[in-house]
Amino acid sequence: MNFSEQKTELNAIYEAYEQAVALFKAGSICKPGCAFCCTHYGSVDITTLEGRIIWDWLSQRRADERAGLQRKIEKNRKSKEKGASAPCPFLKPDRTCLIYPIRPFSCRQLYSVRPCEGRGPTVHRQSREAAKKTIIQLQKLDATGYSGHISYILYLLDRKNFRKVYFNGGFDPGLIKDFAKKHGIAINRHAKSA
Ligand code: SF4
Ligand code: SF4
C-alpha cells in the first residue's frame, strides 16, 4: 500500500471509530477553546504514519512558521524527556488546534462528559474499548512503523536516515534502537489483536 492509499485507509479507520462511538460522544461537553486535554494530558501518542502526515504538512509551511513550530516541538520533547507535562506544540494561542483536520487518533478519541480539570476526561467504557481496537488497526496499517509521543515521532521523522528507510517501506528497528528504548517507542509490527 502506498502513502496515498494508507492515508485513505487511515481516514476510513477514523470514520469507523466516530460512527462506533457517535451515541456516546453525543453527551460530550467538549467545545472549541476547552483544551485542558491538550496541555495537561500525559502523552499524545501517534503512529509514524500519522506523524508523516503532520511532518508533510509542516514541510509545506513558510520557513518562519515552520521554524517556530519546530522550536515548540523541540521544547515539548525536552519537557517530556524530563517527565514534565507540556502543552501540545500545535495548540494555538486561542486554545484551538492548528492541525485539527489532520490531528492524530490520540486526540480524536478524547472527549469527556464532565469537566476534565483535576481528574482528566470521563469517557464511556465502550468508547475506551473501541479506541483500543482502533489503535491496533492503526498500528497494523503502519506495519513498518512505530508508535510514541508526538514530539518523539516527529523527531524521528526529521532524521534523514530514518526517512530513507521508512518512506521507502523499509523496516529496520535497529536504526532507532537506543532512541526507542529511552523514549518508550513501540514497534507497530508487534501490535497484538485486541
Ligand atoms: S476532553 Fe476535556 S479538556 Fe478536552 S475538550 Fe473535552 S472537555 Fe475539554
Ligand atoms: S494535536 Fe491538536 S487536538 Fe491534539 S493535543 Fe495538539 S492541539 Fe490538542
Image: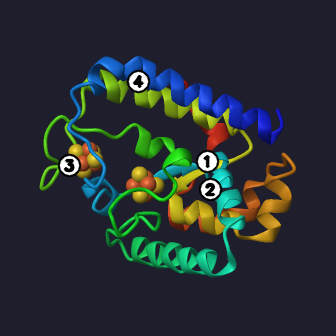
The structure residue drawn at horizontal position 62% and vertical position 56%, both measured from the top left corner, is 54
Percent x, y of residue 41 = 30, 56
Mark 2 / mark 3, whichever is N-terminal: 2
Mark 1 / mark 3, whichever is N-terminal: 1
> Viewer-nearest of labels 4 and 2?
2
- Distance, label 2 to label 1, CA atoms, is 7 Å
| Quadrant assignment, res 79 | bottom left
Q: Is residue 151 above or below residue 29?
A: below
What's the mark number on residue 50?
1
Q: How is the image coloured?
A: rainbow
What's the mark number on residue 120?
3
> Viewer-nearest of labels 2 and 1?
2
Residue assigned mark 2: 54
Residue assigned mark 4: 130
- Distance, label 2 to label 3, CA atoms, is 26 Å
- Distance, label 1 to label 4, CA atoms, is 19 Å
Labelled pair 1, 4 in contact (Cβ < 8 Å): no
